[in-house]
Image: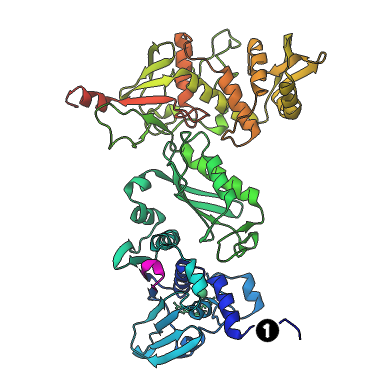
């Protein structure tokens, strides 16, 4: 006697059901997707006991005819694909035709539906595999599916369900995500008679974010809209200097389907390097539109995984989109005057659009301090026509005659901070962090233009490298050489530094090279190259405690405000503090005019 036996149909279908239906949220997901596919503009989800006792989804979609209501519980019964070719161009959410069959195999289901023809409706009641009742009953156009006692006939599965709270929170998570993707649909979630989500129809993502997360979150976001070839990205993401401490507000959608993909999260984090304080994570409500043949969203229908044909293109799209929008935003950290903690802590004060423009290139020669120009005059940034000026308010063409607030540097505090003023505010600028930021931006431009130039050392420096440094040197050599550093071995430990990047002074070159041979800590940088540039910037920047000449101070203040994001240094530390005039006057009890 053989031991292999064909399973009874009922057992087989319960097993199959378990693959589609794992827990209440999977029931909600399948039912809500059916409602969306049916063109509903209003979807109400009701739960009892985290959905374990009851899940009811009611919609005002197309409804079903008598014939469809009878067929819809049959496995592989679907109105969404008829031929194999259809599989290639699926636009609806569900298409396998097994959700209702699976759900009804493991619960007690009541379906009420009407397609609106002739006031009639139908009611179907099932328990496990059995049809209990199929009757005519009046019902408005639309469908309601009631799923009771999930896994009543599979006690082993039922045991795996978690507490009401945690099943509920999965449902809340799913509905939140779905509501973000469909602002044109009204969503309601009611748990044990209590309303948890109520999002009437709105016309934009921003309004939906407002409904779900509130004003403060919405205010901290900027919009993204960017297109490259036939890939498009739009949505909302953190403004520079905003962000939050966790990643809970990161949502990604591909062609409107929510997806989970590590790469997308990594891209978003990288896009925000230098835009957020160290411990902050970006928020993102990100919609990617990618040609259907470039993406496979059905890798695992229940887990919303996704496979991109050209992942690096998606990655770049995210970086660029954030970069473009952030450039419009430029913010610096506002100060909190003591005694007014709380409400204003999180507000961001824009210092205006920056004047930086990739096309104009570098504004001052070299990377460090102003060098002598050909005519012997020190070359100050933004030279004669715009002496140490930066703008508060929208950027204006220099010739437009629009009035700009001019910044004046009053001096240095503790040889570490520049005190600068405009009509509207007092600024305290960290000279080291500021210079670091300026250098970093310049290095990035050099890198982008592949314009590193190396220079011969007049007096080659002799360096003794530790074994560790030598290993690091061998490993990083291609990058170091591209930057313009050239070493020649002079024995077992000694090396001569023969060439160095032209942006540095000869006397600082050796020290900078050594800092690039140090151990790499886990940095939040886009690439090793970028990390190297940050290290160079840090090393070459003026230190705290160093007295500066008035020209140097002006140079720093004006250059800083010409960088895309003056608010943070490359390592994410704040650079500028702003103290508003209105706040000063208020604090000092002076009536504001
Ligand atoms: P699928 O969605 O993969 O087609 P389902 O088992 O989820 O499979 O649904 C089977 C069929 O029942 C659908 O193709 C659709 O025709 C019909 N149906 C299910 N839910 C609804 C609904 N809420 N409104 C209208 N028709 C529905
Ligand atoms: Mg379906």
In the image, residue 168 sits, relative to residue 440, either above or below, namely below
| Residue on which the image places disc 1 | 6
Say whether residue 384 is visible: no
Residue bounds of the magenta highlight: 45-55
Q: Closer to the camera, 116 or 344? A: 344
Mark 1 lies on a secondary structure that is: loop
- How many numbered badges does the structure rendering display? 1
Q: Closer to the camera, 399 or 68? A: 68
Q: Quadrant of residue 387?
A: top left
Q: Closer to the camera, 438 or 251? A: 251
Q: Residue at the front extreme?
A: 1
Residue 52 part of the magenta segment:
yes
In the image, residue 124 sits, relative to residue 455, either above or below, namely below
In the image, residue 547 sits, relative to residue 267, either above or below, namely above
Q: Residue at the right extreme?
A: 491
Query: How far from the left and from the top, in percent, is residue 317?
Result: 58, 47
Query: How far from the left and from the top, in percent, is residue 39?
Result: 44, 73
**Quadrant of image for the C terminus:** top left
Query: How far from the left and from the top, in percent, is residue 95?
Result: 56, 74
In the image, residue 275 sits, relative to residue 311, either above or below, namely above
Q: Is mark 1 within 8 Å of ligand 1?
A: no
Dot 1, crowdedness within 10 Å: few (<14), some or many (≥20)?
Answer: few
Q: Quadrant of residue 492?
A: top right
- Residue at figure coordinates x 39%, y 73% from the top left: 53
Q: Closer to the camera, 120 or 7? A: 7
Query: How far from the left and from the top, in percent, is residue 1?
Result: 76, 86
- Residue at figure coordinates x 39%, y 66% from the top left: 50
Say left or right for 110 vs 564: left
Say whether residue 166 is visible: yes
Residue 460 part of the magenta segment:
no
């Amino acid at each position: 006697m053989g031991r292999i036996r064909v399973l009874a149909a009922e057992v087989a279908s319960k097993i199959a059901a378990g693959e589609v239906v794992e827990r209440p949220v999977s029931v909600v997901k399948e039912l809500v997707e059916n409602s969306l596919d049916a063109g509903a503009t209003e979807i109400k989800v009701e739960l009892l006991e985290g959905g374990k006792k009851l899940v009811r989804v009611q919609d005002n979609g197309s409804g079903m005819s008598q014939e469809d209501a009878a067929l819809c519980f049959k496995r592989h019964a679907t109105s969404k694909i008829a031929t194999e070719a259809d599989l290639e161009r699926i636009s609806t959410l569900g298409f396998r035709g097994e959700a209702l069959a699976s759900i009804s195999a493991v619960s007690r289901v009541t379906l009420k539906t009407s397609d609106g023809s002739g006031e009639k409706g139908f009611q179907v009641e099932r328990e496990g595999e059995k049809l209990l009742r199929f009757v005519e009953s009046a019902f408005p156009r639309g469908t309601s599916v009631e799923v009771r006692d999930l896994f009543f006939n599979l006690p082993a599965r039922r045991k795996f369900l978690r507490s009401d709270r945690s099943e509920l929170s999965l449902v809340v998570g799913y509905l939140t995500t779905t509501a973000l993707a469909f602002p044109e649909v009204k969503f309601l979630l009611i748990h044990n008679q209590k309303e948890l989500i109520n999002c009437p129809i709105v016309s934009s993502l921003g309004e939906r974010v407002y409904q779900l997360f509130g004003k403060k979150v919405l205010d901290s976001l900027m919009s993204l809209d960017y297109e490259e070839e036939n890939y498009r990205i739009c949505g909302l993401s953190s403004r520079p200097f905003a962000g939050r401490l966790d990643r809970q507000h990161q949502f990604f959608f591909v062609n409107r389907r929510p997806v989970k993909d590590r790469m997308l999260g990594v891209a978003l984090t990288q896009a925000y390097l230098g835009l957020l304080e160290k411990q902050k994570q970006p928020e993102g409500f990100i919609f990617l539109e990618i040609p259907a043949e470039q993406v496979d969203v059905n890798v695992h229908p229940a887990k919303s995984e996704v496979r991109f044909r050209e992942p690096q293109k998606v990655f770049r799209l995210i970086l660029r989109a954030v970069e473009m929008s952030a450039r419009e935003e430029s913010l610096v950290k506002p100060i909190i005057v003591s005694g007014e903690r709380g409400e204003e802590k999180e507000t961001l004060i824009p210092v205006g659009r920056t004047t930086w423009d990739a096309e104009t290139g570098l504004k001052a020669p070299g990377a460090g301090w102003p060098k002598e120009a050909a005519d012997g005059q020190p070359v100050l940034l933004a030279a004669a026509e715009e002496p140490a000026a930066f703008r508060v308010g929208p950027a204006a063409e220099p010739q437009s005659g629009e009035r700009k607030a001019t910044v004046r540097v009053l001096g240095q505090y503790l040889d570490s901070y520049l005190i600068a003023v405009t009509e509207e505010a007092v600024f305290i600028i960290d000279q080291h962090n500021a210079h670091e930021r300026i250098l970093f931006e310049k290095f990035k431009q050099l890198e982008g233009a592949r314009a590193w130039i190396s220079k011969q050392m007049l007096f080659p420096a002799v360096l003794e490298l530790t074994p560790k440094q030598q290993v690091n040197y061998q490993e990083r050599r291609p990058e170091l050489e591209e930057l313009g550093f050239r070493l020649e071995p002079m024995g077992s430990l000694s090396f001569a530094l023969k060439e160095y990047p032209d942006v540095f002074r000869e006397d600082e070159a050796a020290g900078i090279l050594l800092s690039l041979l140090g151990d790499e800590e886990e940095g939040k940088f886009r690439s090793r190259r970028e990390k190297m540039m940050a290290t160079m910037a840090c090393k070459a920047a003026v230190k705290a405690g160093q007295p500066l000449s008035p020209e140097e101070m002006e140079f720093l203040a004006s250059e800083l405000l010409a960088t895309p994001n003056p608010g943070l240094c490359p390592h994410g530390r704040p650079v500028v503090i702003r103290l508003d005039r209105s706040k000063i006057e208020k604090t000092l009890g002076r009536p504001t005019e």
